[in-house]
Amino acid sequence: MGAFAQRHANQFLREENAFTERVNAITFFLMSINFALIILKITQSVELLSVGLKLIYVSGFFLFKIGLIKLLGFILKTKDLSKLAVFFSMLFDRTLGFILFPLVVLLYFFSFEVSTIVLVISFVLFLILILMKLFWLWKIGTNSFGLPQFYIFLYLCTLEIFPLLILGKGVFY
């Protein structure tokens, strides 16, 4: 619910305990596996080495993104802001991974050929959630923290949009 209402996201952020850490770990693995399986279906790879490499690349991408945000927060002496940036950025990615789970199950275990339909639905859901993510990060950054819009634009371009363009180029070309 945190991806659709800021009140729920703030409540989840305040209740940081062992349960929320477990939920974060489980949803991170679910997100990584689902994204890797969708990339494998698009590239039509079936080798075990390719599956492992895609899973490592996807997980590494998200871990690198988290590390880079935290590093920037440490360098710029805004650790609290970087913690919030990681939380809200990963909130939408985890939500997408959670929503994609039934579609991935359909993609691999349905008896009829529905891969094109499921991939189109997955892509539409991805676009909707990425637009929501960009909107909420922009809104929260400008309204709640008073960050200049130029800095938010730079963040969104370098850590949210640019990696997706590189991933799209790597998958489709």
Image: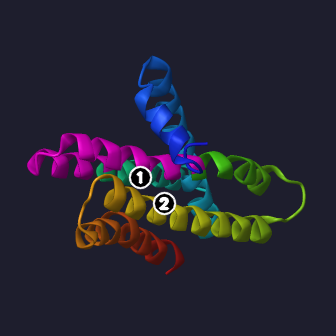
Residue type of the residue flagged with mark 2 = Lys
In which quadrant of the rendered image does the N terminus lie?
Answer: top right
Residue 56 appears in the rendering: no
- Mark number, residue 100: none
Residue 125's place in the image compared with 171, above or below, is above
Indicate the secondary structure of the residue bearing disc 1: helix
* One can see residue 122 in this view: yes
Expressed as whole percent of the image width and height from the top left, the position of residue 135 reads: 47, 65
Residue 64 is situated, as x and y percent measured from the top left of the image, at: 30, 51
Give the colouring mode of the picture.
Answer: rainbow
Residue 85 among those drawn in magenta: yes
- In-front residue for pair 60/156: 156
- Give the secondary structure at mark 2: helix
Within-10-Å neighbours for mark 2: few <14, some 14–19, many 20+: many
Residue at the image position 49 percent from the left and 33 percent from the top: 11
Residue at the disc numbered 2:
133
Label 1 to label 2: alpha-carbon separation: 7 Å
Q: Where is residue 149, by image quadrant?
A: bottom left
Q: Residue at x 85, y 65 (%)?
A: 113
Mark 1 or mark 2, which has the lower sequence index? 1
Residue occupied by mark 1: 89
Between 129 and 167, the one lying in front of the other is: 129
Picture layout, residue 6 above or below residue 115: above
Residue that lies at the very extreme toward the top in this rendered image = 18
- State the image quarter where residue 155 is shown: bottom left
Instruction: Give the residues in magenta.
Output: 66-95
